[in-house]
Amino acid sequence: MLQTIAHLAIRAPKRIVGAAVLVMVAAAVFGIPVAGSLSAGGFVDPTSESSQAGRLLDEKFGQSDQQLLITVSDPAGATSPAARTVGTGIVDRLKASPHVLGVSSPWTSPPAAAGELLSKDGTIGLVVAIMDGGENGAQKYAKALVADIVHDQDGVTVRAGGTAMIYSQITEQTQRDLLMMESIAVPLSFVVLVWVFGGLVAAALPLAVGLLAILGSMAVLRLITFFTDVSIFGLNLSTALGLALAIDYTLLILSRYRDEVAAGADREHALRRTMATAGRTVLFSATTVALSMSAMILFPMYFLKSFAYAGIATVAFAAAAAVIVGPAAIILLGDRLDSFDIRRLLRRISGRPEPAAKALPEMFWYRSTKFVMGHAIPIGLAIVVLLVLLGVPFLRVQFGNPDDRVLPRTASTHQVGDQLRTDFASDFSTAVTVVVPDAEGISAAEFGRYAADLSRVPDVSLVSAPGATYVDGRDVGPPSAPAAVAGGSALLTVRSTAPLFSEASKAQLDRLHTVAPPGGREVLMGGGAQANRDSVQAIMSRMPLVLGLIAVITFALLFLLTGSVVLPLKALILNVLSLSAAFGALVWIFQEGHLGAFGTTPTGTMEANMPVLLFCIAFGLSMDYEVFLVARIREYWLASGAVGPTTSGRAQTRADNDESVALGLARTGRVVTAAALIMSIAFAALIAAQVSFMRLFGVGLTLAVLVDATLVRMALLPAFMHVMGRWNWWAPKALTRLHRRIGLHEGPAEPVTAGFGVRD
């Protein structure tokens, strides 16, 4: 297949490039509007207890967990004439909306309930509107309502927040962050590419391939939105990953092509040889990355599924563009590929001579690899200890779902959330809703007993049951929070003073579940604490399957590439080590608040989906560099024992293994370093995101890539391979026979490539 692609690139480069341009234009027209079809939610398991409770709230009681909260603040007091006028006006306009299921406010509610809606100092009144439309529709309706009714007037300050507005503002912020990310990543990546290739034309080619990958993945995401929900955060991944992988793959192909030309091959032979080696490596690497990311489809939350969709589509387009469009562009450009060489121009201006070509043994990566292998055990142990120590903070991880604090402090939802946490006696986000699906035949006395028992649980401030409110086991009057019997089901509301995601909140939820239900019937609980527990359980219950699947896929693919069972095991161990360092750093920074939490608001928790997301993506990217390096090392290993003009088919030795590793890293070290630098730029651009868990995502991927491409691939890998020697290439006889039948085979590196001069 790759030779066919090379033949087409040589014979019809204009047609291939022209078709690629048409595909890019069509993808842009169809895919760019995708942001309007995406959602900011998807963090909760739709089959969980909290989700079932939410559906019953909507179907039976006309309630929803999507709230629009509006604070009305006046230094003269929330009951001042100005504040009352503004507040009641907001309530009237909310009630007039067909998308609002119910409205409560301190100016229109009964006295018992009105007190909860006033701040402790009496200067802030809270309007609570229950929104229709579910997770996706509520944010659109809330955005339109807020634009119409939330304005400061007559000295009264009005701010909007709540879950509906959180999703709306996250969506808007993410779209702005994408533009910021692209404006940072593209110019910096181009500068690095110019440094690597020298020529402006050669540097522009990987960016063009990256643009095709990004636009193609956007088109795929929009197509998927016709059938299921897709998270808007998938766009962040498609942009960063599309740019990074397209540059990686094109860089590998261009570098190998230049090596072959420098070795004396004509262009056509150089391209065929490039496709047979680097092209195969690109497809193999892309398959590994895509399969690692596909494991996220096994999770029920569409937030994680969306990253799988985006990742697979982006990898597919990046690889296809690199191996189809890249070779055609190389042939079409010809000598112009090296035109506008900035480095040559700068040398002329400064009067410096052209750099002398170096043989491989004189190159930095060859010499540094030999040094590492000469001190393999102390260097290897030192790096392992360092990575393990860096990963220790991850043992203290605490999980929590995102709330208003994922947005910057300037966002109105964050400001409203801070007011609720500090200025009000009750934080509505901590409430637990209790739904009894089958309440037929349960007496009022039994409901009263159940509500009284719930109210005795520590940190419960009150329980609203059908007909009464209970505090510390006592009936204190009519319901002051949602409570009803409808359609054969019952609803109770538990107000809590335990901070969300805290140990007190977890303990309280455990105790609430142990209270004997009314009439022995099934009880479903909802709310933020229960949703968080459900998300963590959904992730943890599937983690063994996902990790096992990724391990099996990685092992199988690397076995097909190398014919060894040792190298795949080594890759799994090294990948886990590199990721442990990144995970530990994330807990230390973002959960525990060190280094100013990188400008975010630490909540003492980490978003439960992020470790899974980071593991699947970073593990796949780690395999990207593993394949780049091991494929080239294997070429030299095969050459060391091949029968040919300079070899006699002798048995390979430890010295052959070490020389193969040194030559392989000398050939790929500069490429991997440049690729890692560009990939880290693409992911580091995510740090500019104003949504905190995307900033965490950017930091995590940047650290994982840099650690993997430096300490692990350039130091720990050669140290390990030196210690193992010829055992690196060992497999049981049965698997060796299997590899001969189904493994990926190619000839050894051509003798001419082993020692020709290149510029370091």
Image (spheres, rainbow, N blue to C red):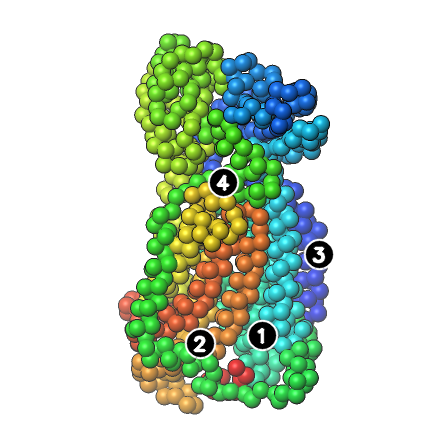
Give the mark nearest the N terminus, 3 or 4: 3
Q: Can residue 487 be seen?
A: no
Q: Position of residue 351 (x, y in %)?
A: 66, 88
Dots 3, 4 in contact, CB < 8 A? no
Label 1 sits on what residue type? Val
> Could you say whether the residue bearing mark 4 is in a helix, strand or loop?
loop
Q: CA distance from mark 1 to mark 4?
A: 40 Å
The residue identified by callout 4 is 402
Give the mark nearest the N terminus, 1 or 4: 1
Of tags 3 and 4, the one toward the viewer is 4
Give the mark nearest the N terminus, 2 or 1: 1
Give the mark nearest the N terminus, 1 or 3: 3
The residue identified by callout 3 is 25
Q: CA distance from mark 2 to mark 3?
A: 39 Å
**Label drawn at residue 665:** 2
> Could you say whether the residue bearing mark 2 is in a helix, strand or loop?
helix
Give the mark nearest the N terminus, 4 or 2: 4
Label 3 sits on what residue type? Val
> Could you say whether the residue bearing mark 1 is in a helix, strand or loop?
helix
The residue identified by callout 1 is 196
- Residue at coordinates 69% horizontally, 53% vertically from top-left? 28
